[in-house]
């Protein structure tokens, strides 16, 4: 009976940790090269990992990045906040004979799709993750 309770506790803890980790969704990156011996990279990362990983970036390196992006950070913050108003929208679509580029938001995630005769690149990032990263960077840069 005690073993069953321990197992139930372990399963419950694992389920809670999984739900917590994936609550903001996932970041997905898919890259396919269409050539002989081309690379095919596909990975999914829980979106909560990115803001957490920023805590391990050395302060001097983070400050250097903030200094470089200082002028753009307020604009990126505003854009990320405004994207919440458009949960399903296409923002950019460029089609030519050999290239296709599309930037859109669907279900609160930014989708960037680029296709040409050599490569396919697909990136999906939750808008909330972008907001978390900007807030985290802002808080750490003000604390110094």
Image (tube, grey):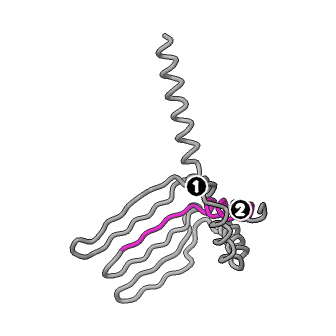
- From this view, report whether residue 7 is shown above or below residue 50: above
Residue 112, given in percent of the width and then of the height, sits at: 49, 72
Image vertical order of residue 112 relative to residue 117, above or below: above
- Mark 1 or mark 2: whose residue is earlier in sequence: 1
Q: In which quarter of the image is residue 101?
A: bottom left
Binning the other alpha carbons within 10 Å of mark 2 as few (below 14), some (14 to 19) or many (20 upward) gives: some
Residue 119 position within the rendered picture, expressed as x and y whole percent measured from the top left: 34, 76
Residue lying at 48% horizontally and 22% vertically, measured from the top left = 7
Q: Residues within 10 Å of mark 1 (few under 14, many from 20)?
A: few
Q: Is mark 2 on a helix, strand or loop?
A: helix
Residue placed under numbered mark 1 in the picture? 53
Q: Is the magenta stretch mostly helix, strand or loop?
A: helix
Q: What stretch is highlighted in magenta?
A: 120-139
Query: Is 6 on the left or on the right of 118, as rendered?
Result: right
**Residue topped by disc 2:** 135
Question: x%, y% of residue 60?
Answer: 66, 66
Residue at the outermost left position: 36
């Amino acid at each position: 009976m005690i073993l069953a309770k321990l197992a139930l506790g372990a399963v419950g803890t694992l389920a809670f940790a999984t739900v917590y980790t994936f609550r903001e969704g996932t970041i997905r990156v898919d890259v396919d090269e269409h050539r002989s011996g081309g690379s095919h990279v596909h990975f999914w990362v829980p979106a909560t990992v990115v803001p957490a990983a920023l805590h391990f970036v050395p302060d001097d390196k983070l400050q250097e990045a903030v200094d470089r992006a200082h002028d753009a950070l307020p604009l990126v913050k505003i854009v990320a906040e405004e994207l919440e108003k458009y949960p399903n929208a296409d923002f950019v679509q460029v089609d030519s004979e050999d290239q296709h580029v599309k930037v859109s938001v669907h279900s609160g995630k930014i989708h960037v799709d680029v296709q040409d005769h050599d490569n396919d690149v697909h990136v999906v990032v939750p808008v909330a993750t972008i907001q978390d990263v900007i807030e985290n960077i802002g808080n750490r840069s003000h604390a110094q």
